[in-house]
Image: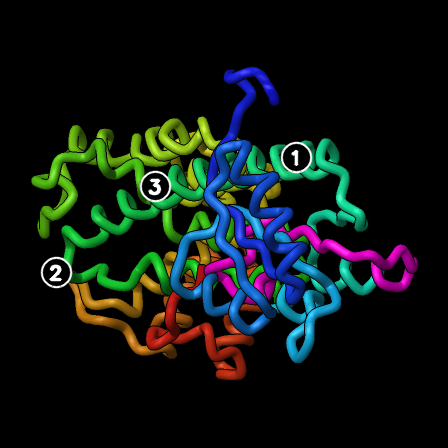
Amino acid sequence: MLPSHLSVSGTILVADDQAANRELLDELLSSEGFNVLTAPDGAAALEHLNLVNVDLVLLDVMMPEVSGFEVCARIKANPDTYLIPVVLVTALSDKQDRIEGIRAGADDFLTRPVDRTELLTRVRSLMKLKHHTDELERAESVLFSLARSIEGKDPYTHGHCERLMNYSASLGEHLGLPQEQIVALRRAGIVHDVGKVAVPDAILLKPAKLTPEEWKLMKEHPIVGERICAPLKSFRAVLPVIRHHHEKLDGSGYPDGLRGEAIPVTARILTVVDVYDALTTERPYKPAFSMTDALKTMQQEVAKGWWDPQIFEEFERLITRGTVNLLSKSAGATK
């Protein structure tokens, strides 16, 4: 047994059509302090996953009706379960089976007869990884909740975060950005204004023009937002978007007065969709612009040297074609 400072715990689901195999794994894992659930087939395993929070799944490959490969693939295709580590347990050592398991999304493999030490070592390693992932998910959820609570203060910005998440990710995909930057844009769409938590409501919701002192305080929110999100390593690519989504190509933006390509491309993308959403949304000081009027206004601002002309041109093309479903105010949020 590992020393107490290295111990881990959690719930493990064991799926195997052979009762003897289930009992053996149950005994080995329960004796180490794990909570073990068992299922006699793949269908029962999937049912367990719908009802109980599971930290790790041990799947027999050769099960009738729903094989371990198929169960694994379904787990990894489900947004609610895809982060659960899956270990495929098999008596087969054929290379093709391992390839099929990798394609299904398996995180590890065990070969029968199962060696106790190998089993516990692999399980503990994956359980630690799952616990770290859960902590990260909780931290991200807190940030997203905070961002949405700020949005919720102003009825005029309802749905703004979800729209920006969808707009920016769709535009990023259209521009051929790497997946890491697409994910960063989706996250930034939600948390880009989280720094407004430091701005008093009297300023945040003021319908009249801000005073110079109030405007100075408002312009600090990208820096505050970057500072709030900085501890999360998974948000490393999001930080430049948060800090620079109010910059302008001619250097007249804030907080750093960056010019041209010194502004990260992800920030330039979010800026374009942020401006469009603000123009097409009713605010206390203006009605909602039509698509045509909003794009015309933005064309004038591009001519002033504010927004990236190539990014705006591609965004305008997507909007006017109406071929991208996510680029609409009725678009639902996706994680």
Q: Name the residue rendered at 61%, 55% in the picture.
A: 22
Q: Name the residue rendered at 48%, 42% in the picture.
A: 241
Q: Secondary structure at mark 3?
A: helix
User: Around disc 2, counting alpha carbons within 10 Å, would you say few (fewer than 14), some (14 to 19), or many (20 or more)?
Assistant: few
Task: Give the number of the disc on residue 120.
Answer: 1
Q: Look at the image and give the residue range highlighted in magenta.
A: 75-98
Residue 92 or residue 166, whichever sits in front: 92
Q: Position of residue 54 (x, y in %)?
A: 47, 51
Task: Give the number of the disc on residue 143.
Answer: 3
The structure's colour scheme is rainbow
Q: Position of residue 5 (x, y in %)?
A: 51, 16
Spatial CA span between label 2 and label 3: 27 Å
Residue 91 falls inside the magenta stretch: yes
Q: State which quarter of the image contains the C terminus.
A: bottom left
Spatial CA span between label 3 and label 1: 35 Å
Q: Nearer the viewer, mark 2 or mark 1?
A: 1
Q: Is residue 226 above or below residue 181?
A: above
Q: Position of residue 78 (x, y in %)?
A: 53, 65
**Residue type highlighted by circle 2:** Pro
Q: Is residue 147 above or below residue 167?
A: above
Q: Is residue 250 above or below residue 168?
A: above
**Residue type highlighted by circle 3:** Leu
Q: Secondary structure at mark 1?
A: helix
Contact check, label 2 and label 3, Cβ < 8 Å: no
Task: Give the number of the disc on residue 284.
Answer: 2
Q: Is residue 199 left or right of residue 332?
A: left
User: Around disc 1, counting alpha carbons within 10 Å, would you say few (fewer than 14), some (14 to 19), or many (20 or more)?
Assistant: some
Comes first in the chain, label 3 or label 1: 1
